[in-house]
Structures are given as structure tokens and as C-alpha cells.
Amino acid sequence: MSIQILPDVLVNQIAAGEVVERPAAVVKELVENAFDAGARRIEVEIEQGGLGLIRITDDGGGIAPQELALALTRHATSKIGSLDDLEQVASFGFRGEALPSILSVSRLSLVSRTPGDGHAWQVDGAGALESEKPQPAAHPHGTSVVVRDLFFNTPARRKFMKSESTEFRHIQQLVGRLALSRFAHGFRLLHNRRKVLDLPPVDDEVGREERVGTVCGEEFLRHAVFLDEQRGGLRLWGWVALPAFARGQADLQFLYVNGRAVRDKLMTHALRRAFADAMHSTHYPAYVLYLELDPARVDVNVHPQKAEVRFRDSSMVHDFLFGTVHRVLRELRPDPALNRPAQFVAPMPPAPEPQQSGFRYAAPASRYEEAREVAAPAWTALAAQVAQLPQSQPVSLSMPAPASGLSVEPEEQPLGHALAQLQGVYILAQNRHGLVVVDAHAAHERVLYERLKKQLAEGGVPSQALLVPERLQLPEDAVDALEARREELSRYGLQIDRAGPGSVLLRAVPPLLSREDVPAFVRSLVSDEDLRESSHHLGEVLDAQHRVMADMACKAAIKANRRLTLPEMEALLRDMERTELADQCNHGRPTWIQVDMAGLDRLFLRGR
């Protein structure tokens, strides 16, 4: 076949393959055009998941009648006029491909009215523009783009679409993402003539938080902290959820660069590293974050859908994001009133309407029995543990002795005072909010881990020589790996010498490890591929170091069924209050929960 120039319709359909991936992509392009038109209120109407109808209506500046047909022409745009404009793009639909691409695979109507026009004007097309001459139409100031029968002329593309509910879910998530990018804009979303979302414009902190709660859920907002930091011409602000709110999927990760929603690998990597030692490796952090910088320092013209960006100084951006979020997380301390890693919600059956009489409503006896059955095992065990405690327990710590009775702890002791140990696993404490339940092993593990990190940063973990060296039998390649890392392992307090082809001698160990824990710890070292293989990449080295310290802390932490005294429990609570990231262990599990008085009252139907 000879070389030939492709027809315009086919060129646009090829471009549509890049821009119009699914109905949600059409919504994205058209809503972003509304942003650029100066709209303040945007309505998105959907039918049949977007395959039947997509109608985007805005109150923006509109399009002049003589430019309506031009707007549907490939590479026609009002957003850029020179290379300088392209290198510091501040608008969204600057490529001039979206409208002609959408037209090429749908039946499209474009209706618009500028403030100076007495009425609106309209152009139509099905795969291609029917006429370049616009027709009069009725429409308020602004623009409506109506897209019907998406992919009607490309049936192979239409077959790849998912179900109506799936396609609409993508649209709903997209509109939520766009709504978080423009708080001053109002959004309305309808599906099959049913209102799904109605967000008025907001311009204050309370309104912004309400919108974040609507899109991301109140649970996210309750576990999130707000940050706002500027440095070196960069500003990062928004909400970051505590590590204990980590998700099984990356569905609550919203990133914006100069108001543009992006999926950027560099930014995602920086944020994941900020959570690295506070979250399980299979979980994902949740955040709504906004990065602002000079448009000339970021290239947004690197992806057909403008979903990715490229920074002029990527390492600076990476370090700024990592450092800011990492610092915010590490400055948090256990705070039952604000930063609860988990909250116990007592079950409560719905109560019937009270009788219209002078008597207070009393729940039927069956409900009291139901609540009593739920609460009885825990409280019976608690009573048994408390009964075994001595009446007077001396406390020798730097902190004051816990007062007797229902005391209120000082502000600097938010985790309260220890009451008892439950089943050799949990510490029960009382604070001003109610009951605190602490996982002793998880909490001690985090305290030891942070202590080890500090020691390593200050020169190395202390070492304690063994009176009698201990011999360990290991595979020969494992002995080779330990011998190659001998100097590095000494920083962790380990002195290891080769004793033969398949054995080593342990001559010194970290003081926090018992002699019984050392063999298992050494074997875990040689099973770590990152330690056995030579690696000079800083990130991999740091990850390996963190795993070594995390494993050491896990081996040395309080074991289940170890009986603790009240002073030991008190000391652990105070250590948690002074320790960074004490709300979760090194694996991302919560270390404590707060059972407030309202939850306890619900358990026992008090006041019902």
C-alpha cells in the first residue's frame, strides 16, 4: 500500500483512542474546559453510565458563535499561542484535541451563549461536524456540551466498556476528584435523572473540610491531620490520614499539582516512603494533598490525558514531599481527643419511640440481657484481673504515682494510668475520656524500634559481649553473607566471626535481645535478600536497615503472657507518649484504642 495522508475523521478517531478511554475521560475533558471558561457552577448529567448521555453544563464565559465550529476543529485552542505559553501552562484543555476527538466517536451538540449575546448558538455533529454555520438556540449564559451514543461508530471500542454501574462509578470518582481540585466551584452530578452529588461552592476552612468529608468519607476526615508548609518556592498543603487508617487499596489518594489532578510516580513514591516504617507493606496511605509551584518548574505536556507531570527538579520535589509528611507524622503523639488511631463503637440496638406519658422510657429486659451478654466476658475478665492486684503498689519512676479512685490524668499523660493487665496481652488504663486498651507487645515494639533508630543515627547500637560465645550452624552461603556484612552488622551491636564453612560464633549482641532471641534474629538476617545482595541504592539500604531494626525490636519486645507490674505498665505508657509514631507498631497495626465513656454507656444502655 502506498503512503497516503489519513482522512481527518480517521485522524480524530485515532486521537480519541488516546484521549477518550471511557465515558469518565469525556467528563474529565469537558469539566476541565469549563474550569478554563471561568465557570463557577458545573452540572454533570449522566445516563446509562455515560454511554447513553453525557451533558456538561456550566455558567462560564461561553464561546462566540463564530468560534463554535472552530472549537470542534483539531489543534484549535485559545489556551496557548507560543512555545513560551506551553512551557508554563496554567490552563487545562490546552491541546485542542478533546472536543474533535469526542465528536469523532459520538453524536455531539455544542450550545453556548456569551454575556454579550441575546441568545445562544448551537452546532451539531455525528462523527463529524454537520455544518460550520451555527443555529440559534435557547440557553442561559455559559456552555452545554451534550454527548450521546458514545462509540456508536466504533463498535469494537464499545464492546470493551464495562457495565453501566462500573462506568458510572468511574465518573462519580472522577467528579469527586475534580470537586476536591476546585473548592470555589459548585458541582452537581445526576445519573439517570437521580441526584447523586450536590456540592455548593465553599471558601472557608470549614467548608473545605466538609467537602473532603463528603468525597472521602467522615472516617477519613476523623483520622486526618492538616498540614501546610512552604519551602524553596514549593507549597504543600492538605490532609494526611494517620498510618492506622491505611487502606487495602489506593482508593483514597488524591494528588494535585497547581490544581491539576495527577497520578505521579515520583510524588507517590515520596509519600509512601514517608509512611514506610509506620504502615504494613501491603497497605496504602490515604491523603488529599496539593502541591503548588511556579508553572515553569513543571511540564504538564507529557501525557495525552494530562494525568502525569514532569518536574524540572524532581529530587527537590521528592525530598520536600517526603520531608514534610514524614515530619508531620513523627510529630504526632498519642492524643485520645484528636488523633485516635482506632475508636471502639459499642453496639446499640435501635430504641423504639418513647411512650407519650410522664414516665421515662425503659428498655425491655431482653435488651438489657443482650447488652449484658455482649459485655459480660470482657468485664468479668477485667474484674478478675483487678481483684488480683495488691491494694497498694509502690511506684518508682520519674513520674508521680497514680492516684487512687477515679482520678483525672494531667494533660501530659493522655494515655492515663494503668489499672490491670488482661490475659497477659493487653494493658488496661484509665484516662479522662474513659478506658484505654494497649497492645503491650505492639507498643513496646514501636518504642524499641524508635530507640534503635536513634542509636543507629548516633553511631551504632550498644553491644554486650557474651561470656561464652554461641555457635550457630547456617548454610554456607548465609555464612558468606554474614562475613561480608560483618562491619555493617557491628553497627547493630552484633559481633560475628566465621567459625567454619557452615558456622559462625556470636561474640557480642545488643543488650535488649535476650540470649534466646539472638539465634532467630541472626537467621532472619540471612533470609533477607536485600542484606545478602550487595546494594548501594540509598533507598534499598535504608529499607534493609529499617527491616533489621524492626525485626530486632520485634524479637526484644514484651511477649504475650508475660506478667507486668503496675510500674512496668506505667513506664510503657509514658514511653509511648514520648515516642514518635507510637499510635502504630512497625507493621502498621494500632498499638492502642480508646473506649470512651459514651461507648461504655451504650454497652450498658445507660440513660436509655
Image (tube, helix red, strand yellow):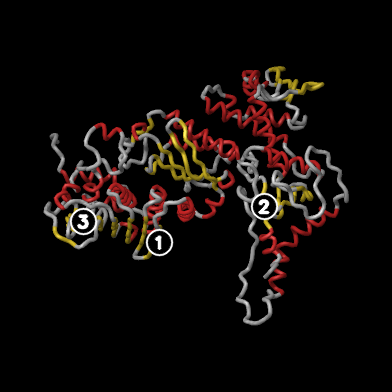
- Residue assigned mark 2: 594
Which residue is painted at 69% across and 34% down in the image?
448
- Residue assigned mark 3: 113
The foreground one among 454 and 9 is 454
Crowding at mark 3 (Cα within 10 Å: few <14, some 14-19, many 20+): many
Q: Are marks 3 and 2 in contact (CB under 8 Å)?
A: no
Classify 123 as above or below 352: above
The Cα–Cα distance between marks 2 and 1, rounded to whole angstroms, is: 35 Å
Q: Residue furthest right?
A: 391
Q: Nearer the viewer, mark 3 or mark 1?
A: 3
Label 3 vs 2, first from the N-terminus: 3
Classify 137 as above or below 352: above
The foreground one among 52 and 594 is 594
Q: Are marks 2 and 1 in contact (CB under 8 Å)?
A: no
**SS at mark 3 in the image:** strand
Label number found at residue 196: 1
Classify 595 as above or below 563: below
Crowding at mark 2 (Cα within 10 Å: few <14, some 14-19, many 20+): many
Tell me the quadrant of the picture where the N terminus can be found.
top left
